[in-house]
Image: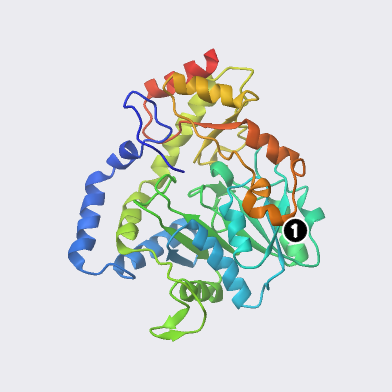
Amino acid sequence: MDIKLINNNMIKFLDLQKVTSKYADEIHNAVNRVVDSGWYLQGKENEKFEENYSHYIGVKHTIGCANGLDALIWILRAYVEMGVMKPGDEVIVPANTYIASILAITENGLKPVLVEPKLETYQIDDERIEAAITERTRGILIVHLYGQCAYTEKIGELCKKYNLKLIEDNAQAHGCLFHGQRTGSIGDAAGHSFYPGKNLGALGDAGAVTTNDSELAETVRALANYGSTQKYVFKYTGRNSRLDEIQAAVLNVKLKYLDQDIALRREVAGYYIQHIKNSRIVLPVIKNWQSHVFHLFPVRCKEREELQKYLNDQKIQTIIHYPIPPHLAEAYRYLGHHEGDFPITEHLAKTVLSIPMYNGMTEDEQNMVIDALNRF
């Protein structure tokens, strides 16, 4: 998302300057260390981050790459190179997601098969998945949307029953838990984004793949390095998609504080849920607080545009996640979907509004948001 500079009196949707100030001295030291080292790609900072992130997520392998979309692209491309998938095969994916989840599928010549979400959770409806499985289905890509765990035991059972790969889009859910296990370690592989606005954000684009599959890890690492398995030896037609040393150093600093930052986000979310009282506004339903890291705090309102304008007039910044469902995007017109094909997804696209949510929000700022929403 693009966070524009706004009036200092505005309550920002996300105040990156305030968030980053917490670690400013450590980040400056880390960046200077890289600058002074004279080594800026595929060095010790990358090795350290990959080791630390693997330990944090609970996997054997982390492979840094340029961004979260690339992470998903390389996972699916690796499966194609390994013979697990081939162009034309199908991958089930939630209809209610950011378009990157689907771009990764089509980028590899695979077919996205969209499944509606549950209205209560916004996550893929596990009761609808089996009906979407065909003889060409090779995987399920779940998206831990808004920071909430999308995985269910039923999804795991379906993957075993039909011998499907389970891929996680963990771009919005670093630190999220499912029965004590971190998202990003549940499936066969996971893609992670460290875009600056994420709970674990770099100071630019950055991403990673996590997996316990050594063959997949080796293939992904080669694909993201021009397809090279060793210098000037090219096994695949890859691309240049590497995590640079400065971003790795920054992520190493911020990773130490991630659980603390998530706890602060949960406090804000809890305060919102306790105090927002307006029958026109639908709040998130939280059944397990450890399974949500509140990358976003989406509310629903039938008068969404009116609410957004009202909040803007009250100097409260909001963002719509997301106004056009992927199946109605011009880019995917060729898939043949039409308005009305996915009514729950379309309803969410018309009613969801994300209100300010970040670690570092003051109680006064939270109260201003709450008071404004209660007066609407």
- Nearer to us in this view, 80 or 331: 331
User: Horizontal and vertical percent for residue 114?
Assistant: 71, 52
**204 is higher (above) or lower (below) than 39:** above
- Nearer to us in this view, 4 or 120: 4
User: Horizontal and vertical percent for residue 75?
Assistant: 56, 67
**197 is higher (above) or lower (below) than 36:** above
Instruction: Answer left or right for 314 relative to 45.
Output: right
What residue sits 58% from the left and 61% below the top?
Answer: 104
Instruction: Answer left or right for 14 relative to 60.
Output: left
On the image, which quarter does residue 280 sit in? top right
Sort mark 1 into few (<14), some (14-19) or many (20+) by Cα contacts within 10 Å. Answer: some
What residue sits 40% from the left and 55% below the top?
Answer: 205
Residue furthest left as drawn: 36
Instruction: Answer left or right for 290 relative to 287.
Output: left
What residue sits 74% from the left and 42% below the top?
Answer: 339
On the image, which quarter does residue 108 sit in? bottom right
Question: In the rendered view of the protein, which quadrant contains the C terminus?
Answer: top right
The amino acid on which the numbered mark 1 sits, given as a three-letter code, is: Leu
Instruction: Please tell me whether mark 1 sits on a helix, a strand or a loop.
Output: helix
Q: Which residue is mark 1?
A: 158
- Nearer to us in this view, 262 or 180: 262
User: Horizontal and vertical percent for residue 296?
Assistant: 51, 38
Q: Visible in this render: residue 83?
A: yes
User: Horizontal and vertical percent for residue 37?
Assistant: 20, 67
What residue sits 45% from the left and 82% below the top?
Answer: 229
Q: What colour scheme does the image use? A: rainbow
On the image, which quarter does residue 346 sit in? top right
